[in-house]
Amino acid sequence: MAEIATVILEFIKCVAPPTRSCVDNHRKFKENAEDLRKKLRILEARKEDVERRLQDEVCSEKQAKKEVVVWLQDVEKINAEIQDVLKELPGVSYFSRARLGKHACKKIVELDDILGRGNFSEGLVVNKPATALPFRVENLEGEVSVKEKIWGYLTGNEVQMIGVCGIGGVGKTTIMKHIHDELLLESRFDKVIWVTVSHPLNVGRLQDEIAKGMNERLRKNEDEQRRALELKEMMGRVKYALILDDVWQGFMLEDVGILRPAVENGCKIVITSRKVDVCKSLGCEIVKVSPLSKEESLNLFLDKVGRDILQVPELEGFWKAMLEECAGLPLAIVVIARSMKGVTNVCEWRHALNELRRRVRATAEGSEDEIFERLKFSYDRLQDSNIQNCFLSCSLYAEDYEIRRDDLVEQWIDEGLIEESSRQVMLDNGHFILNKLENNCLLENGHSKDTIKMHDVVRDMALRIGPQFMVRARMRLTEIPDEHDWTENVEKVSLMENGISDIPLNMCPNCPILTTLMLQGNIKLSQIPGCFFANMQGLKCLNLSETSIESLPHSICNLENLTTLLLRDCRQLKHVPCLAKLKALKKLDMLKAGIDVVPEGIDMLVNLQYLDLWCPKLVELPTQILSNLSHLQYLTVYSKSTTLKIKGEEVCGLKKLETFQAQLYDLQDLNNYVKSNHFKRLS
């Protein structure tokens, strides 16, 4: 026996380095294994606590510390390694105990180290780096003296509050965008903050936007007075330049929490407004922005219409007369000149001039109606009702909202504003229309090349043309508009990105010609009354994305004209009624929805072109469900479940499919599909 024991000990020494006694590892095997399990449970609980705190604290202004990110990665790594060790324990042989016991001891030491690093007593998050981005604006035509005057006030000590005033479209915002960009290049101010002030004024939103401009965040559930004190304390820590664009009504700085600028703190505030009285009520030094001079107007007009027009002498009288009708307003000059770019026919110029004159003469001189009629002239010259409707649809977004180009094109397709064709053709047509609107200066670039926005005056004009729209987007609403606001002739309603939490149980708006309803981004909205859709027989496009709804009301099944149903990021969604009656439905988007079963009746949606079932909790896709969906152009199916798979032969039957993402049954199925002609046609 002694000889056998000696052999075993020598064998153990050969296969395991002697960092600890192998005999001790063998003897304490059970104790080490239990200690490993216990400490792993503690670490997992600590990880959950950290992740929960991060979820509450990380926002657009705050980010996780790098040490926190590394710690979470270390936790994931050691968790996986320990799980491998624990899997070996049940069937471990007598002779393997020493090896595993030693491995367990090593992991316990690592666990202790990671647990020790996971206290984060100094917090989990830090401020993100300054995110103020320059505006991508073209060269400023004229207004040099105005810009220099404002700059002098900003760099001097005599004036702390500046009011830039002038009629709509005269160039106030453009001037301030140039100044904003120049301030970013200097180190004169710690923070340069730009806020477009909503109309009507919303104190809560204004507080949030100012805090955001400083990479801070105010507490959501506090009342405005407490938030004002918090904001004032934040602003007191920095030397700031605050630009409040498009202010329509006076307010008290103290009510918002804006630290009053003074020589001592070096801070400045600039306000742009169409109303001199508003700027005076805030104690501003007034800087008036006047229309461009004749020479400045001429240069701007020729830049936009194209200087090659000078080579056509017979047009000179017409374009000079048209320039006169623009009255030196930069926005009108730009929009009208762009609408005439490339036109060389004398008759068309004569007709356009007469039409513009007729519009302007019908309005009171100096009124806002004048600028609206000048802009509407450019809208009418689009001459294509589809393009015009696409333009009007942009006004459904909030004022100064930067819309992603791809999202806007999808919105137009969803509303049926793009002629039906293959998906790629529709996307191309949408971007063609978008570029046309941008080239005509009815849309302008956002901060990013991927975004687009509307000038506030252009948006006002669009809403005038489409008075059958009810747009209350991003206005911090906590309640849905009263039922009497939902008139019988309303065609489109946008209540996106508010704080609406519930809809009255008996609310049943009578909107028979309503075609588009945008409720996305109301993250507190958890339920919709059963009767809410009862009198919306004409509804075609319904967006409930990014809400907390748990179930869809059965009345949605009676929306027989519905073509688009968007339920993206509805993570609490558990129940969807049978959709079989929605024969007109072309798009069903359930990306990241919380459902675990495919909604009943999908196989009856014979006109469906777009189906996104990227649903992490989805268990299975019933067989043959795709066989009836012969018009599908876009199909995504995903789940964390390994049982959710699609047969390649089912996909091959979808002859119009252009985009496909899913897990096929096995490698052989994948190989067969990749070799098929169907795969080669995918985009």
Image (cartoon, rainbow, N blue to C red):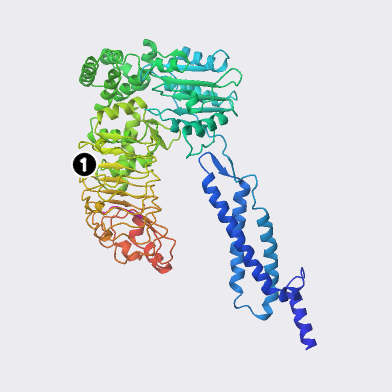
**Callout 1: helix, strand or loop?**
loop
From the viewer's perspective, is residue 439 above or below residue 159?
below
Residue 150, can we see it? yes
Magenta stretch, residue numbers: 608-612
Q: Does the magenta-highlighted stretch encompass residue 138?
A: no
Residue 276 location in percent, x, y?
40, 15
Q: Position of residue 479 (x, y in %)?
A: 35, 39
Quadrant, the N terminus? bottom right
Taking the image as shown, residue 158 lies to the left or right of residue 380, namely right
Q: Could you tell me residue 300's position as x and y percent?
A: 38, 18
* Residue that mark 1 sits on: 510
Which image quadrant for residue 349? top left
Q: Is residue 237 left or right of residue 417?
A: right
Q: Quadrant of residue 368?
A: top left
Return the x and y of residue 351 as percentages of the image width and height. Answer: 20, 19
Label 1 crowd bin: few (<14), some (14–19), many (20+), radius 10 Å: many
When the figure is inspected, residue 131 is found, relative to residue 377, above or below; the finding is below
Depth check: give the residue in front, 90 or 602.
90
User: Residue shown at 61%/59% (left/top)?
Assistant: 43
In this view of the protein, can residue 342 be seen by the observer? Answer: no
Between residue 301 and residue 556, name the one nearer to us: 556
Q: Name the residue located 33 percent from the left edge and 29 percent from the top edge.
A: 459
- Residue at 59% over, 50% down: 69
State the residue lying farthest toward the top.
294
- In the foreground, 307 or 392: 392
- The prevailing secondary structure element of the residues shown in magenta is strand
Q: Amino acid at mark 1?
A: Asn
323 lies above or below 674: above
Residue 188 falls in which quadrant of the image?
top right
